[in-house]
Image (tube, coloured by chain):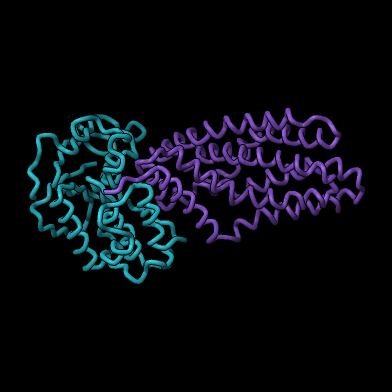
Chain colours: A purple, B cyan
């Protein structure tokens, strides 16, 4: 009897979610298209003045990317609950928090990473100076996993309730605010030539905290959701 | 039944019941299950058969009474991987093939010696459908794909909720055969079923449920 190794289990989970996402490639494209369309509409609505667009560019890109991520958030556990995969996952002799961490990682890879890849394009459409783009990318690289992790906890908490989408948006809003403030603060500071490391460090600290705690909270919430 | 019942039962319930909104779902249950035994859970619709199986799997908490696993109170950490639960929801991803689904299960639960995903699928009667998405299989074939986990994963206690549903006569005989081999090898199983079970390994124990 070969014992299930932790590394194999993690790899199996990650491969499973990535394969599933690949089989439904259209769903990955949707947040990207959404972000593209929203960013494209801003110059039309506000007029093509460089100075105005430059000033708002960082904030617009950040908010658009974070909102686009929310589109795919509430589907994170719903299909697993419906088809009974989650029961099997809970019963497996593996640490549930770690397995859910893999799911969250897969979610980040399939939703946030494509958005980060097109972020320079979005920023360029709004005339964000090229020198600021690395800071924007760094802010996104820290803010998006933070949002994935916090979002996963809330999705797990609302799992099993019908039409949880609205509730989820309401609960997530106050949690995204700090991430948006720090990320946008870093971009604004870089744009004005000020030191931008402090807000980035705050984002990093919040991310480290979330990486440790969010999967544990997710696991507890889903156990409760199944125990009803 | 080849394995002689040992002194300590594999699973023991004493006055076990489950409360839903302070209402008991079923009357208190007492039973013991030893290694090598098969128990048939009987009861009308809504008498709590599925609830009982979900409690034994560790998905629901014990309401009142005691539930012991090898003599000690059942805890998820100690018995994880030893109990295999197959519910109404089959736990298969519709977009993945039976082969991929089983690879995930093996990754999470481990794998028996001397079997692999392909051999197990051939044995369960899904040879030739290994790479077809589960979405395109018939209800009976989906059930077989889920039952293939019984052959693949190492587990001592099987909790099977309606394993005969959707299966044809060959499939039903196959499930009976699986149960026989499993109990002969010292495993135990709890099965809920409405259909007739023709179990050749001896008279199964009956657990009667009352709402």
Q: Residue at x 52, y 39 (%)?
A: A158
Residue A30 location in percent, x, y?
A: 65, 56
Q: Residue at x 32, y 67 (%)?
A: B126
Q: Nearer the viewer, residue B75 or B102?
A: B102
Q: Nearer the viewer, residue A8 or B140?
A: A8
Q: Nearer the viewer, residue B116 or A153?
A: B116
Quadrant, the C terminus of chain A: top left
Residue B76 location in percent, x, y?
A: 32, 35
Question: Is residue B19 visible in the rendered structure shown here?
Answer: no
Residue A109 location in percent, x, y?
A: 59, 49
From the viewer's perspective, tell me whether residue A152 is left or right of residue A133.
left
Q: Residue at x 73, y 28 (%)?
A: A198
Question: Is residue B82 visible in the rendered structure shown here?
Answer: yes
Q: Is residue A18 above or below residue A150?
A: below
* Total labels drawn: 0
From the viewer's perspective, tell me whether residue B41 is left or right of residue A86.
left
Q: Is residue B40 above or below residue A96?
A: below
Q: Residue at x 86, y 53 (%)?
A: A44
Residue A83 location in percent, x, y?
A: 42, 53
From the viewer's perspective, tell me whether residue A170 is left or right of residue B158.
right
Q: Is residue B59 above or below residue B193?
A: above
Of all residues, the one furthest to the bottom in this rendering is B128
């Amino acid at each position: 009897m070969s014992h299930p190794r932790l590394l194999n289990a993690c790899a199996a989970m990650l491969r499973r979610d990535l394969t599933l996402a690949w089989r439904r490639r259209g769903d990955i494209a949707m947040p990207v298209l959404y972000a593209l369309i929203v960013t494209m509409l801003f110059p039309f609505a506000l007029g093509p003045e460089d100075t105005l667009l430059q000033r708002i560019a960082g904030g617009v890109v950040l908010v658009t990317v974070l909102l686009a991520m929310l589109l795919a958030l509430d589907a994170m556990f719903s299909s697993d609950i419906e088809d009974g995969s989650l029961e099997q996952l809970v019963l497996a002799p593996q640490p549930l928090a770690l397995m859910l961490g893999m799911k969250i990682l897969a979610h980040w890879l399939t939703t946030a990473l494509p958005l980060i890849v097109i972020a320079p394009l979005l920023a360029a459409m709004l005339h964000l100076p090229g020198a600021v783009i690395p800071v924007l990318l760094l802010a996104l690289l820290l803010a998006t996993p933070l949002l994935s992790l916090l979002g996963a906890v809330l999705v797990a908490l609302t799992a099993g309730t019908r039409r949880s989408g609205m509730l989820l948006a309401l609960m997530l809003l106050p949690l995204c605010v700090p991430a948006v403030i720090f990320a946008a603060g870093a971009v604004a500071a870089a744009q004005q030539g000020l030191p931008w490391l402090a807000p980035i460090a705050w984002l990093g600290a919040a991310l480290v905290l979330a990486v440790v705690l969010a999967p544990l909270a997710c696991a507890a919430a889903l156990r409760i959701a199944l125990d009803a | 039944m080849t394995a002689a019942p040992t002194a300590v039962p594999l699973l023991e319930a004493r006055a076990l019941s489950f409360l839903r909104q302070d209402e008991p779902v079923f009357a208190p249950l007492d039973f013991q299950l030893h290694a090598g035994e098969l128990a048939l859970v009987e009861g009308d619709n809504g008498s709590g058969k599925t609830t009982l199986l979900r409690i034994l799997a560790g998905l629901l908490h014990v309401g009142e009474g005691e539930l012991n696993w090898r003599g000690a109170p059942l805890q998820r950490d100690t018995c994880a991987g030893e109990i295999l639960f197959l519910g109404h929801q089959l736990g298969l991803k519709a977009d993945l093939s039976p082969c991929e689904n089983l690879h995930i299960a093996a990754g999470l639960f481990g794998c028996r010696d001397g079997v692999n995903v392909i051999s197990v699928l051939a044995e369960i009667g899904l040879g030739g459908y290994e790479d077809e998405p589960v979405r395109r299989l018939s209800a009976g074939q989906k059930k077989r794909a889920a039952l293939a986990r019984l052959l693949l994963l190492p587990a001592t206690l099987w909790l099977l909720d309606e394993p005969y549903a959707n299966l044809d006569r060959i499939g039903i005989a196959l499930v009976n055969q699986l149960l026989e081999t499993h109990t002969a090898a010292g495993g135990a199983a709890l099965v809920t079923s409405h259909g007739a079970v023709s179990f050749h390994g001896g008279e199964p124990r009956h657990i009667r449920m009352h709402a």
